[in-house]
Image (cartoon, rainbow, N blue to C red):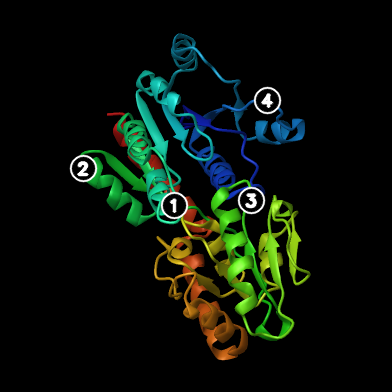
Amino acid sequence: MVIQKENLLIISPTLPNPKMSAGDYRVYTLVKELKKYFNLFFIPLNHKNLNKQDIKNFSQITCIIKPINSIKIFQNFLKEKNISICIFEKYFNMPFEIYKFMSSVKIPIIDTHEIGFLKSQALSKIQKTDNLKLFKAKELLFYKNAKILIAITGKEKTILQQYFPDKKIVIIPTCTKISKTERPFSKRKDICYFGFYGHQPNIDAVNYFTKNIFNKINIPNIKFYILGYGSNKIKNIPNNIIRIDNITNISKELSKYKVFICPLRYGAGLKKKILDAMASHTPIVSTSFGVEGIKNIDTKYFDINSNDFINKIIELYTDKNLWQKESKYNFNIVKKYYSLTAFKTYIKDFVKIIKKQKF
């Protein structure tokens, strides 16, 4: 007997490009997996200047709908397509006003990606930040309108549960591809950082590290590679710092380096860049903002301004046994909890929860 799929709508700030950012990658993998269980409709709020090839490729996965600005038209669309479930992807530049549309949906779900006010609170400790209370209040109001919240880590689920003790909150971590090849210690050199540089925390992290930390690392001829889309935005760098903007294979690229450094000074949520490093067998030196929320990771975090941050880089760079130990352990963690195989299990459990909400 063929079971007819229900219809589900996903509203996202933009059409996801999985090579662009962690948020886009998360939405893209979520859509691909949910397609197994639902007929999908997808509204990218920023519909202008979309690449025609991206539209064509994504249209093979889901039905792309142009933004609907009127609540009345939105309600008619839901009725016409028989849609009772809608996932709102809250990341990047999702406008706050979209919450007004949520009451029209029987089962509104918010994929939080990260708790934004936690990032703002962390940022306020290193620079003056206005309207923290207003930002937090608006974000919580947004969450209040959802029937189900998707948290990215256990830590963020706990925090959300404090504000919404009666709301259903599920965990769906971001996942990453697992590398099939392992490049040994002896065939690696230099250190690297990977990220999307349209995202301010990444720019801040790299600028701070290059200006204040890198020149203190006493390793002859070491180079620092700034990897990822938009890395050319980083200006005024010396010759021993290299930018690579276009990365076609993340795992293959990261496997060239001995150490992945993550000098984030603020942030929230689960960092796919750390998962990518773990998946490529590359040990990590990070602040707390880089490794937060990752289960059982064998990496202590350090204050970016401490000698421990620098000493740990040198230790991993020169100690083959320690390097191999952390490389193997962290790879097994990411394979168990954050692989595409693990992601499928999270989605399967999530679908069961949605089905229960309908009764």
**Is 306 in front, or is 100?**
306
**Of circles 3 and 4, which is in front?**
3
Residue 235 in picture, x, y percent from top left: 72, 56
Q: Earlier in the sequence, mark 2 or mark 3?
A: 2
Q: Which mark is residue 48?
A: 4
Residue type pointed to by label 2? Pro
Of the two numbered discs 1 and 2 in the rendering, the one whose residue sits closer to the viewer: 1
Give the label, 4 or 2, closer to the camera.
4
Q: Which residue is mark 1?
A: 123
| Crowd rating for badge 2 (residues with CA inside 10 Å; few <14, some 14–19, many 20+) | few
Give whichever of 12, 107 is nearer the camera: 12
Q: Position of residue 36 (x, y in %)?
A: 52, 39
Give whichever of discs 4 and 1 has the lower sequence position: 4
Q: Label 1 sits on what residue type?
A: Leu
Whether 231 is drawn above or below 260: the answer is above
Q: In percent of the image, x 53 and y 87: which residue is there?
A: 322
In this picture, residue 274 sits left or right of residue 188: left
- Using the image, determine if residue 161 lies above or below residue 275: above
According to the picture, the residue beneath numbered tag 3 turns out to be 197
Question: Horizontal and vertical percent for residue 347?
Answer: 44, 46
Looking at the rendered structure, the kind of residue marked 4 is Lys
> Residue at the location (67% across, 60% down)?
250
